[in-house]
Image (spheres, grey):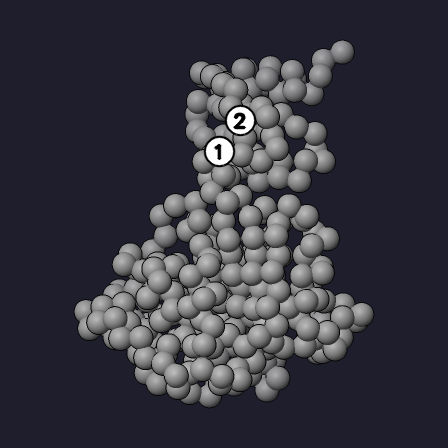
Amino acid sequence: MLTGSFIFLRIAAFTTCYFQYSIKACPYKCQVAIYLSNGPILKAMLQDDYKYARQIALRVFNADDLKKIRNSVVSVIGVGGVGSLIADLFVRSGIKKLIIVDRDYVTSSNLYRQVLYDENDIGDSKAEAAKRRLSKVNSDVEIEARNETFDAGNAERIVSSSDLIMDGTDNLTSRLILNDAAVKNMKPWIMASAIETYGQVKAIIPEKTSCYRCYFSGEPFAQPTCAEVGVLSSLVTMVASIAWTLGIKVLTGKEVDGSLFNIDAWTQEIDRIAIDRMDDCECCVLKHFEYLSDRYKNIGLEFLP
């Protein structure tokens, strides 16, 4: 009787003009991989119950990429609708460590769109509830929960300990603080927002792309909240998926530009807009980090998206 792996090799030999394979060590627990010469196709010779098998099989990743993912520390600032999905995706991808920052508590209104929580978590810290859930998803990943407000007092400490920071906040001030801390410490971050049926995503890579203040150069102002205008549950999934994909590309060194993705979940339209660096940007050019000043410490921001 032919084994499944032998059948796979025979099919590949017939369907590929030139078949070449080599044995390589995988950065996960995988011991054997096969490469086809018509692209970086990594096929793990593993049983289907191996947790990273489907990720390893992707053409877009190679062994070095998977090692980078496994050695990465990612912070998610705010684990509401968008942030909880992003955190879940990174834990499932097998990063080294996830840092969760959120001072909010689970309410019944969160359950409509925040996938890490259920009715038993109502009243609990979001950071701690998210950690409990995610620890069951993938025990390979170290998870640190910080039940605290993200502000100018702790922003640099959190940012500097991360390889990538993911935005799950719901207000301009938080993003401006995060932008200043990330640019100052040369750390990439992904902006992600969702309100009503509209979302935005943008990658900020210091010295390579435009920063958040190239895009938003005004003073922060009060915006409508999800409590006031609602948020479509499918929107947070779309926003989180695009944000996570940009984040994983950043971690693995793939090409990422500073384009802004505008998303309308109701019409299923996604626009991509080029955002160039401002020649006189206060943050990424002039290095004026005003949102790290004492004025923005202990400001009591909440993370509700």
Residue at 45% over, 82% down: 297
Q: Give the residue number, with chain letter if any, for mark 2.
A: 25
Residue at 67% over, 61% down: 131
Image coords of residue 138 (percent x, y): 67, 49
Image coords of residue 201 (percent x, y): 45, 65
**Residue 305 in sight:** no
Identity of the amino acid at label 2?
Ala
Q: Residues within 10 Å of mark 2 (few under 14, many from 20)?
A: few
Q: Earlier in the sequence, mark 1 or mark 2?
A: 2
- Image quadrant in which the C terminus is located: bottom right
Identity of the amino acid at label 1?
Ala
**Residue 126 in sight:** yes
Dot 2: element? loop
Q: Residues within 10 Å of mark 1 (few under 14, many from 20)?
A: some
- Contact between labelled residues 2 and 1, with CB atoms less than 8 Å apart: yes
Residue at 56% over, 61% down: 99
| Left/right of residue 205 with respect to residue 279 in the rendered view | right
Please tell me whether mark 1 or mark 2 is closer to you in this view. 2
301 or 35: nearer the viewer: 301
Q: Give the residue number, with chain letter if any, for mark 1.
A: 63
The quarter holding residue 295 reads bottom left
Q: Can you say whether 232 is above or below 3 in the image? A: below
Image coords of residue 198 (percent x, y): 51, 73
